[in-house]
Amino acid sequence: MIAFAFRRMFGSALVLAAVSVLTFLIFEAIPNGDPALRMAGQNATPDTIAAIRRAWGFDHPIWRQYLTMMRKIFDGSVISYSDQANVVQQIRRGLPATISLAIGAMVLLALISVTVGTISAARAGRVTDRILTVGSLVGFSTPPYVVGALILYIFGYSLHILPTAGYVGITAHPWAWFTHLLLPWIALAIPVSGASARILRASLLENIHEDFVRTAKAKGLSRTRVMIRHVLRTSLIPLVSLWGLDFAALLGGGAILIETIFNLHGVGQYAAGSVQALDVPPILVITMYGAFAVVVFSALVDILYAVLDPRIRLTTG
């Protein structure tokens, strides 16, 4: 286990280093990527631009600029080029909304996927299965921002049932927190749950004929108990990695459009504004933050595999 953890940590460090280098170089190589020109303004003189380059270190070699940027990221002093705000503080300000959005969406995703997938597998070939199959395909084929726009119009602007925008902290007002996030949760959960439900259905139908299921039935266990405690537990394994990576992607700003549509002021919305302004420091920090989330949750998925299926063990070789 120690050797496994060491390998994962070393591999994670290499991934983060590669991601940071590529992200930094991409935004340095794009046209009009010189931040000094944007910071100086439209009518700036060459002397003003040169002064900004010297003050911010843009006249240094590219490798030195990268190392300086990484040092500032790790000590928390990295500053945005557009508004000169502390990037780490800005991300911390948006984290509660993004974390709340990701957790709620994944809980709703899991509930929908397991419910639809299990019922569909139990009623395979019947009318219920066909209806759920069509519904899953429609949900999977619809982008989250389309679902978000539709439910925002129906439940927000037409029926006036739920708030249409903004984020309220859970500690400030739990009910307002829930109502403000319910529509974004639905918008994110429906498209992904369609694919997850289909994967779970296929896995359930495959595992239901395994030897351990026949053994459980021979012991006199009820069909429901066999389905939930034995078949479903094993069949969830293919979805664990999918859900883990989806959650990591949401934490890393993967819900940019949803946060923008519902004006949640999360990390994703901050990333969208930074990309539009070609502001390298926030983009680099958010990208590394997202890569770190993916790496961490990938490791957690490996551990969860062993919990769900005792036949799977983490090797140290």
Image: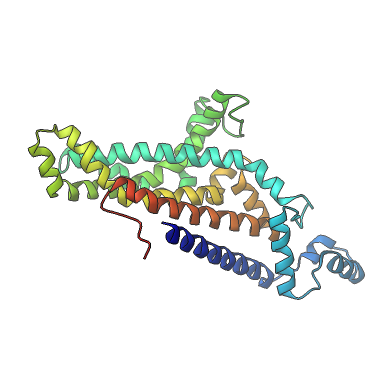
Please tell me which residue is depicted at 60% across the width and 38% down the height of the picture. 96
Nearer-the-camera pick, 314 or 238:
314
The answer to whether 212 is drawn above or below residue 14 in the figure is above
In the image, 261: left or right of 300?
right
Image quadrant holding the C terminus, namely bottom left
In the image, 104: left or right of 269?
left
Does the rendering let one see residue 247? yes
The answer to whether 2 is drawn above or below residue 317 in the figure is above
Percent x, y for residue 39? 81, 60
Please tell me which residue is depicted at 39% across the width and 51% down the height of the picture. 303
Percent x, y for residue 89? 71, 46
In the image, 268: left or right of 85?
left
Nearer-the-camera pick, 210 or 38:
210
State the residue lying farthest toward the bottom: 61
Q: Quadrant of residue 316?
A: bottom left
Image quadrant holding the N terminus, namely bottom left
Percent x, y for residue 300? 43, 50
Percent x, y for residue 178? 52, 28
Judging from the image, the colouring scheme is rainbow
State the residue lying farthest toward the left: 218
Nearer-the-camera pick, 208 or 38:
208
Please tell me which residue is depicted at 65% across the width and 71% down the height of the picture. 25
